[in-house]
Amino acid sequence: MTLHFRTICLLFLLGGVLAAIPADAAVLELTGPEGASVAINGRPRGFFPLDHALDLGPGKYLIECRLPGHKDYAWTILLASEEDWQRLHVRMTRYSKTTAVGSNLIFAGLGQHYLDKPAKGWFFNIAEAGGLLTALVAEAGRSNYRKDYLVLIDKYENAINGADIAHYRLKSQEAYQDMEDMEKLRDAGLLVAGGAIVLSMLDAWLLFPAVEMGPGPGLTPSSDEAADALSSASQHFTTVHAGFKLSF
């Protein structure tokens, strides 16, 4: 009776061990910069350095990593079969303040595009391009009105009768006023374009992303699903990491 009971217990334990072994598992070993968050197909899997390789089923996986002060990383990897084993080292590009600020001298907004802030980038792009286009059109109009003014002022100076004198004087004054209006519009366009450059440089300088040590919000899961994933990952990854907070 005792032997039979022991046999049942051993079979039960053996079944539990076999159930714990992942079926159809391919191995993915990930390494990368310390503290960077890791997500696979949108599910959080912890922070670098990971303590264990990941046992995954065959298939296509999107690897996403984030670290404040660095460009977001995304790469798709294919595990072809159950026996597949791959190693991926994540290299993340750190933002350069010199590049972020200096590129705005070439064209306003390029620094914001470099920092992955497209909305701001397009705003400054449009502001400078619009200002320059306005200044160009206004300068062409000013040049035409100046030619008209010179012709009219010549006719005014050479007019003999009073009616012609009054007519050409009025027309020359109108042409001169139109020329001044185009000059003001040109200057306004140049001011907008120059302002876009200066503001984009200040924005890139003052709001350049910096890394601060601390618990930060980066360790807080954004949903119940993410919380479950982090809880599951914590059973395998025991290394304690410092959290990061993105400050502006």
Image (cartoon, rainbow, N blue to C red):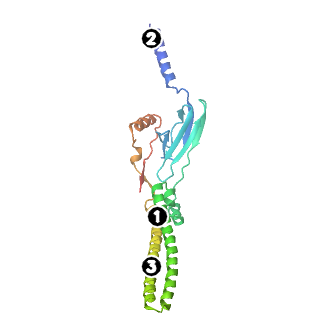
Q: Is residue 117 visible?
A: no
**Residue at numbered disc 1:** 127
Question: Which three-letter amino acid code belongs to the residue tagged 1?
Answer: Ala
Q: Earlier in the sequence, mark 2 or mark 3?
A: 2
**Residue at numbered disc 2:** 5
Question: Which three-letter amino acid code belongs to the residue tagged 2?
Answer: Phe
Q: How many marks?
A: 3
Residue 226 vs residue 31, the one in the foreground? 226
Asked whether the beta carbons under mark 1 and mark 3 sit within 8 Å of each other, the answer is no
Asked whether the beta carbons under mark 2 and mark 3 sit within 8 Å of each other, the answer is no
Residue 133 vs residue 240, the one in the foreground? 133
**Residue at numbered disc 3:** 180
How far from the left and from the top, in percent, is residue 4? 47, 9
How far from the left and from the top, in percent, is residue 86? 60, 37
Q: Nearer the viewer, mark 2 or mark 3?
A: 3
> Which residue is pictured at 59% across the width and 39% down the height?
87
